[in-house]
């Protein structure tokens, strides 16, 4: 049985985190650190990797697809801006 570890990931300047991580990796936390949004993901380091994409979407934005799972929300600039983190998937369940 392979141990799991938690790794920190960043979003790019467009609020997207395109990652190669295991399919069963799980987001355990989203938060601001040093003024930037971060994702902490629990994963098996030696597991096969697949491309996964996470997006920051602001409150009131209308581009959320109904089948994208919500993985967390984050407040930036002292709570003045709130983003919701969704994993972009192709599965329209």
Image (spheres, rainbow, N blue to C red):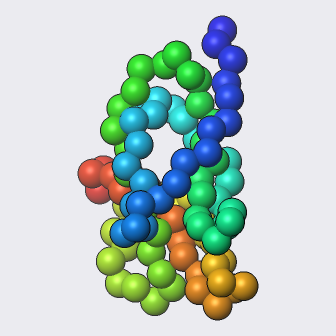
Q: Quadrant of the N terminus?
A: top right
Compared across the picture, whether 56 is left or right of 41 comes to: left
- Residue 22 seen by the camera: yes
Point out residue 32 in the picture as x, y percentages from the top left corner.
Answer: 67, 67
Q: Is residue 8 above or below residue 5?
A: below
Q: Quadrant of residue 93?
A: bottom left
Give me the residue at 46% from left, 30% from top.
22
Q: Residue at x 29, y 56 (%)?
A: 92
**Residue 87: percent from left, percent from top:** 43, 55
Total numbered badges shown on the rendered structure: 0
Q: Percent from the top left, x then y, of residue 39?
A: 59, 53
Q: Is residue 75 above or below residue 30?
A: below
Indicate the quadrant where residue 50 lies.
top left
- Farthest residue to the front: give it: 34
Q: Nearer the viewer, residue 62 or 56?
A: 56
51 or 68: which is nearer to us?
51
Name the residue furthest top.
Answer: 1
Q: Residue furthest right?
A: 78
Question: Which residue is at a point 58% across and 23% down the rendered structure image?
Answer: 44
Q: Is residue 31 left or right of residue 65?
A: right
Q: Residue at x 44, y 75 (%)?
A: 57
Q: Is residue 68 visible?
A: no
Give coordinates of residue 49: x percent, y percent. Answer: 40, 27
Q: Is residue 55 left or right of residue 32?
A: left
Whether residue 68 is situated above or below residue 18 in the rendered picture: below
């Amino acid at each position: 049985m392979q141990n799991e570890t938690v790794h920190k990931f960043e979003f790019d300047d467009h609020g997207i985190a395109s990652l190669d991580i295991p399919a069963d990796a799980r987001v355990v936390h989203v938060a601001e650190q040093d003024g930037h949004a971060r994702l902490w993901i629990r994963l098996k380091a030696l597991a096969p990797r697949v491309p996964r994409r996470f997006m920051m979407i602001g409150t009131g934005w209308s581009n959320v697809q109904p089948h994208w799972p919500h993985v967390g929300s984050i407040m930036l600039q002292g709570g003045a801006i709130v983003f919701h983190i969704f994993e972009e998937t192709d599965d329209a369940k």
